[in-house]
Amino acid sequence: MVHSSGQPASLPRARLSGSVRLPPGYEPAWFLFTPRGESLWADGWEPLFPAPASDDTEPGTVFETVHGQQRTTWVVCAREPGRSVRYARIAHGRDAGTVTVTLDDGTSPAGPLVATVDYDLTALSGEAAASLAQFAAHYPQFLQHWEEAIAAATSTPDA
């Protein structure tokens, strides 16, 4: 006997990876990808912490962001201070998965510091599947926007 919950058999999953070149000489590069640090360069990024978080990258830390009508819950899953951070995220009613940011080891002789940004997301509804497909199709432009925003935000002396 086969049981069905009335849900579609499967919803799309997008595994995306790309890189963001970081400004040369910007020492606290990892900070740019922490919950509070991202507010330096990401318009509208205002993490809300339901519990006190003196270290916003401590595994288990929970925060939320709101963009327009979209509320997203984030949980810090893992970190290697100065090198990488992994978040679980649920964009309520839209998609869920993980976001991992890893800085290169800084041993590249001539190139700039690079952050690799990996998204692994699954749509949560049939309606959200189209949104996830669009995000995946424009992922390189999404990361290009990050690169430009970070460069602009770190180009001032008080950054």
Image (cartoon, rainbow, N blue to C red):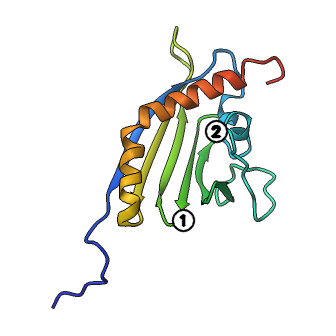
| Residue holding disc 1 | 92
- Give SS at disc 1: loop
Q: Name the kind of residue labelled 1 in the image.
A: His
Indicate which disc, 1 or 2, sits on the residue closer to the N terminus.
2
Q: Is residue 40 above or below residue 79?
A: above
Q: Quadrant of residue 81?
A: top right
Q: At x 81% / y 60%, what residue is drawn?
A: 52
Q: At x 32% / y 57%, what residue is drawn?
A: 12
| Residue holding disc 2 | 33
Q: Give yes or no for contact between labels 1 and 2 (Cβ–Cβ under 8 Å).
A: no
Image quadrant occupied by the C terminus:
top right
Residue 69's spot in the image, x, y percent?
61, 59
Disc 1 crowd rating (10 Å Cα; few below 14, some 14-19, many 20+) is: few
| In the image, farthest residue toward the bottom | 1
Q: At x 32% / y 63%, what residue is drawn?
A: 11
Horizontal placement of 18 versus 31: left or right? Answer: left
Nearer-the-camera pick, 20 or 129: 129
| In the image, farthest residue toward the left | 1
Q: Is residue 105 above or below residue 56?
A: above
Q: Is residue 104 shown to the viewer in this render?
A: no
| In the image, farthest residue toward the top | 110
Q: Is residue 44 above or below residue 59?
A: above
Q: At x 55% / y 16%, what residue is drawn?
A: 112
Residue 32's spot in the image, x, y percent?
67, 34
Q: Name the kind of residue labelled 2 in the image.
A: Phe
Q: Quadrant of residue 128?
A: bottom left
Q: Nearer the viewer, mark 1 or mark 2?
A: 1
Nearer-the-camera pick, 127 or 143: 127
